[in-house]
Amino acid sequence: MDVRKDQDTLVDVFERIEKFLRRLEVYTQVPPTAEMMDTIIQILAEVLIILGVAMKEIKQGRMSE
């Protein structure tokens, strides 16, 4: 049961990231200001950190236990 819960949590994280990136796509279609670019870069860096943590958890086998 815990494995299924962990998998559901991971799927939820990826779905939220997907929805966020789709919204972010709208902002990339207008000429960005310097501040906007800084914010977009910071957000994408955080997304990469989240993905890195998720991958680390998967590699450590916590998702398969």
Image: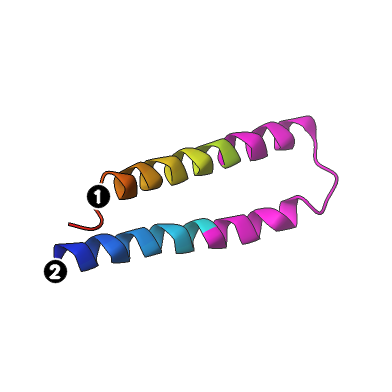
Q: Residue at x 73, y 36 (%)?
A: 37
Dot 2: element: loop
Give the label, 1 or 2, closer to the camera. Answer: 1
**Amino acid under disc 1:** Gly
Of callouts 1 and 2, the N-terminal one:
2
> Would residue 32 appear left or right of 50 to someone viewing this image?
right
The vertical placement of 34 against 10, above or below, is above
The residue at 66%/53% (across/down) is: 24
Instruction: Give SS at disc 1.
Output: loop
Q: Nearer the viewer, residue 41 or 64?
A: 64
Inspect the magenta stretch and tell me whether residue 14 lies in it: no
CA–CA distance in space, label 1 to label 2: 15 Å
Q: Which residue is mark 2?
A: 1
Q: Nearer the viewer, residue 52 or 40?
A: 52
Residue 39, numbered circle: none
Percent coordinates x, y for residue 44 in the rendering: 59, 41
Q: Magenta stretch: give its range.
A: 18-43
Residue identified by numbered label 1: 61
